[in-house]
Image (cartoon, helix red, strand yellow):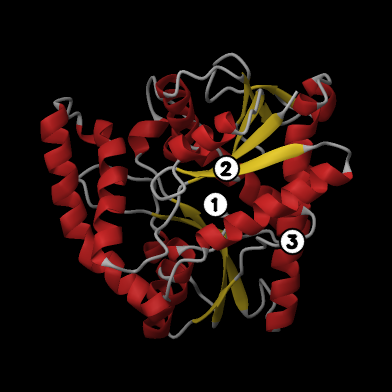
Amino acid sequence: MTTGVLLLNFGEPEETTREAVVPYLERIFLSNMEMEDIEDEEAARERARELAEKRAPGLLAEYEEMGPSPLKKQARAQADALADELGGRGYDVEIYNGMQYTEPFVHDALREARDDGVEELVALPVYPLCGRTTTVESLEMTEEALEELDWSPEYTEVTGWHEHPDYVELRADNLADFIDDEGVEIGEDAELLFSAHGTPTKYLEGDLGHRYDDYVEEFCDWMADRLGVDNYLLGYQNHENRGVDWTEPDTEDVIEEVDAPHVVVEPVSFMREQSETLSELDIELDEECDELGVELHRVPIPHDDRRFPGVLADLVEPIVADEPLDDWGMGQCRCKETEATYCYGPAY
């Protein structure tokens, strides 16, 4: 049986032009139109266009300052590394990258997999912490694309995997090594700030009720514990441009609470560098720190850590090998309770 693994991610344009950025933003706003309860398709598209036009100048300015996004380049490298890791374990698996909002789009990646003769497909979002607009939405896009293509391979979805011990270890090691290299000491002359991707609170309440904020806090606790840090700060990188409530507190507000000459900022939600790290943290947050007289030390994303392909392979191998998933620490996902949807975590 020919097996394919679809690695899913948000995507970001490599071209820093208005022609690339506006359609990218339109796709994002249109996909999340449920935030504003607009059901009419024409009205939704008009609103998405309006929001994209409003946001585009700011994003273009960010790209102008930070340079082209490396997200897709790092995604390709991670896909190659996963193929090598699975090959080393004795599995001949094809790896595909599918992006939610930029090329290669999910639909196009799936068409390629179908044309390659893939019979078994594993969809794996490369988001460390499971969220509604990231993990769940990327999988919903995959299901919609499969239906549009009228293609029904043997299909399995993987959602959250932040509990994988090797992943926790590699992030904690990366943070500890960075702190050591920077020559600062948490609790003495520096404070530790975890910065997480924000999400509308609507997705954390009521019937939607996803656990993203719980996962963030859980993961930060584990990281701090491994570093022997008793106290840390946590903020969310929100994009408040639609008149809806977002996760609190904002990272930019939390930075004002720092009572030390140095702050170490760890972007816990990301496994690839992108505008939310290279612009929002390295440029915008750094400027705020300068105004406060605080030196910012931003932890780099360990996107090329040698252990990361093994983490992803551990999520794929039991499916490909047709082994009991609970033996590998995987079970039915609680955020997306559909058949053949699994996440990693002994508690599940």
* Residue at position x 22%, y 59% in the image: 55
Residue 35 position in % (x across, y down): 26, 35
Q: Do the residues labelled 2 and 1 touch (CB within 8 Å)?
A: yes
Above or below — where is 243 with respect to 259?
Answer: above
Residue 201 is left or right of residue 49, and the answer is right
Q: How far separated are the C-alphas under marks 2 and 1?
A: 6 Å
Q: Mark 2 points at which residue?
A: 129
Question: Tag 1: Cα neighbours inside 10 Å, few (<14), some, or many (≥20)?
Answer: many
In the foreground, 310 or 151: 151
* Residue at position x 68%, y 58% in the image: 230
Marks 3 and 1, the one that precedes in the sequence: 1
Secondary structure of the residue carrying numbered label 3: loop
Quadrant location of residue 155? top right
Q: Residue 269 carries which label?
A: 1
User: Mark 2 or mark 3: which is in front?
Assistant: 3
Residue 42 position in % (x across, y down): 12, 32
Q: Which amino acid does label 2 sit on?
A: Leu
Above or below — where is 143 with respect to 307?
Answer: above
Question: Tag 2: Cα neighbours inside 10 Å, few (<14), some, or many (≥20)?
Answer: many
Marks 2 and 3, the one that precedes in the sequence: 2
Quadrant location of residue 76? bottom right
Q: Mark 3 points at which residue?
A: 305
Q: Which amino acid does label 1 sit on?
A: Ser
Marks 2 and 1, the one that precedes in the sequence: 2
Q: Which amino acid does label 3 sit on?
A: Asp
Residue 174 position in % (x across, y down): 72, 65
Q: How far separated are the C-alphas under marks 3 and 1?
A: 16 Å
